[in-house]
Image (tube, coloured by chain):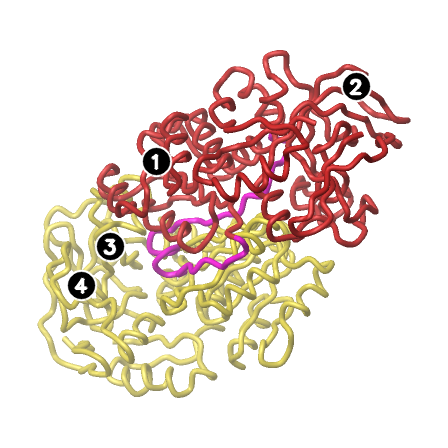
Chain colours: A red, B yellow
């Protein structure tokens, strides 16, 4: 089958590889669409940082690896002992978390921070290929009203739903979303779906600022063009938003979130900021206004929450799709395009 | 009356001043005991940083000021229109928060972060004096089983209860308390009272390490003598504590709290760290183990929770009292002693 195999930094090769054979508890999926994630982009241009370079403890797999973990498709084959009501022809998407089920975090209902956590497409071969394997516990049926294209958004949308739920966005809140990439734009929609009265977006890219306005932001602000904190305070009785979602996660975005929120606000920070530490004063940032800054990592069963919202249109994905390409064009039309024309793009979907 | 008046950095004068007259809604209290708070110490040696140097918006008062906000005493006079069941002779302690009752935070049940927040002893004359005024809304009756000495601990104990409650310390938790000053040692007891199975303490001062062991710590660790994170992980299945109370609030103590806690831990940070920012990586500190770092500022009605625990002995204060002095000796026996012999002291109580 045709697959995009990641060999190392900026070395992705479209190759003909053997079709995978489902093992115990696994299914084989014919991939319909797979989105390019920011993680894939970082891996290609700067990595491998997350892709397994030594055998992953749960999968035994390592580089070279087929990337791609935001996908939808049809089940075409079941391996032995698959648990659950799965059959050939089922339209599915996949929660790509590969988990041990045995560590403290798994047993404590936080499989998203499993001590041995891996992902399909980073710790086992992913979906930039004609076929991909998944474990039975990773499968979610696509409702009839969710297209394969929308199904490929179930993974990033679940990241955003998880962050919005962790932040406790509540009916009537005024919410701030900093960083309007796909995760941010899905968070804008999730916050509105959670009942936020207003969502303010912060971003520098033109396409993403427009995306914010198209997908539910009351207003968007470009920190290169205005004093974002002052503008938000003008619109919030001088005291800032109730809640913030920090989709960038770096020091500057954390500062915006802290300064543009009111007393007792929660700042959920799904963004990684490239690991760059944020400077947070316990005195002035946390205590004097009693705020909380909380981590938010991927999702914990949010797929079952996300899929109905993708189906009924509360989470829109067509507006987030800036290009659809074939896997043959993954490097030039995908990874290079996203780097060189970042200002034009939101999500690029890839068809094997 | 005799009072200790704060004129500026290291300028505290024992003077004879006029007795205060209770205004509308105020009572006059004959002070029995008043503790020296770390805030008082910082004001004396490094301030004034918090004491009002211009007229406070709610009290109109400014320096020179009588400090002292951790106190107990008897009501000796009522001003006009005092609301509530208060009478001369009532044994009381005082929640020293001076609040506007009108700002967003007050109306949102967070009077502890009132936009105009002041404190008796920092924004109005306090209790290093024979008499002190308090507003009716600040008063709490001392139960019969709470001594005046213990009553003077109601304020710092409420700080610790608030932090332990904010942190969500839960039955059977293993808790970490970093910084075993009075707030830390009260937090150790509060965590145990909240059902913590084990509390580990971190401190460098000898008296405070001993205090930790005397007041409920399973073990205490001195970062100058061991690798605290490694020692705590040895005792917690290699994954760290469930919850942490950061009573120092600086970068090093935050690092200990982040590194010595397990997945999904909450770190409450009542300590101010002198305003020094802590470096927190959204990626590795918050997201990958989905932790939350939360502010905790003074108290919100915790006095009603603290007083019964002071009465029944779950919060002990005698072991926290390292000296009892007269107000005449406040500078030498109090402020200078606490600076020069910090290693020997916990709380010093002052009698007018």
Q: CA distance from mark 1 to mark 2?
A: 42 Å
In the picture shown, does residue A222 fall above or below B225?
above
Query: Few, some or many C-alpha atoms within 10 Å of disc 4 (few <14, some 14-19, many ≥20)?
Result: many
For mark 2, what is the residue? A86
Specify the segment rendered in magenta: A274-302
Judged left or right of residue A205, residue B194 is: right
**Chain of the residue that carries numbered disc 4 in the rendered image:** B
In the picture shown, does residue A90 fall above or below A201?
above
Q: Are marks 3 and 2 in contact (CB under 8 Å)?
A: no
- Report whether mark 4 lies on the same chain as mark 3: yes
In the rendered image, residue A345, in percent from the top left (x then y), is placed at 48, 34
Instruction: Choose between B247 and A340: the one closer to the eye.
Output: A340
Judged left or right of residue A50, residue B243 is: left
Disc 4, SS: loop
Is residue A98 in view from this perspective? no
For mark 3, what is the residue? B117
């Amino acid at each position: 089958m045709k697959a995009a195999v990641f060999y190392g930094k900026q070395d992705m090769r479209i190759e003909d590889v053997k079709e995978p054979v489902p093992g115990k508890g696994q299914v084989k999926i014919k991939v319909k669409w797979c989105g390019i994630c920011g993680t894939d982009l970082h891996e290609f241009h700067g990595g491998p940082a997350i892709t397994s370079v030594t055998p992953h403890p749960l999968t035994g797999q390592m580089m070279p690896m087929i990337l791609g973990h935001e996908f939808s498709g049809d089940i075409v084959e079941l391996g032995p002992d698959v648990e659950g009501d799965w059959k050939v022809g089922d339209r599915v998407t996949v929660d790509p978390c590969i988990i041990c089920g045995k560590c403290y975090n798994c047993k404590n209902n936080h499989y998203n921070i499993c001590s041995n956590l891996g992902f399909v497409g980073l710790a086992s071969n992913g979906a930039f290929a004609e076929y991909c394997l998944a474990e039975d516990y990773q499968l979610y049926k696509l409702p009839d009203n969710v297209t394969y294209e929308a199904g490929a958004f179930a993974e990033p949308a679940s990241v955003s739903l998880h962050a919005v739920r962790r932040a406790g966005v509540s009916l009537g809140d005024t919410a701030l979303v900093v960083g309007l990439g796909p995760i941010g734009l899905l968070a804008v929609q999730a916050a509105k779906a959670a009942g936020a009265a207003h969502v303010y977006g912060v971003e520098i890219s033109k396409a993403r600022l427009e995306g914010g306005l198209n997908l539910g932001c009351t207003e968007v602000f470009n920190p290169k063009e205005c004093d974002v904190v002052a503008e938000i305070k003008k619109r919030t009785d001088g005291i800032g938003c109730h809640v913030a979602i920090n989709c960038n996660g770096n020091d500057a975005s954390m500062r915006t979130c802290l300064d543009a929120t009111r007393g007792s606000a929660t700042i959920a920070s799904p963004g990684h900021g490239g690991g760059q530490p944020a400077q947070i004063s316990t005195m002035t940032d946390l205590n004097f206004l009693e705020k909380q800054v909380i981590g938010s990592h991927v999702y914990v069963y949010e797929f079952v929450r996300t899929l109905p919202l993708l189906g009924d249109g509360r989470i829109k994905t067509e507006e987030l799709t800036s290009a659809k390409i074939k896997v043959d064009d993954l490097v030039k039309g995908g990874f290079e395009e996203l780097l060189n024309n970042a200002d034009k793009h939101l999500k690029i979907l890839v068809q094997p």
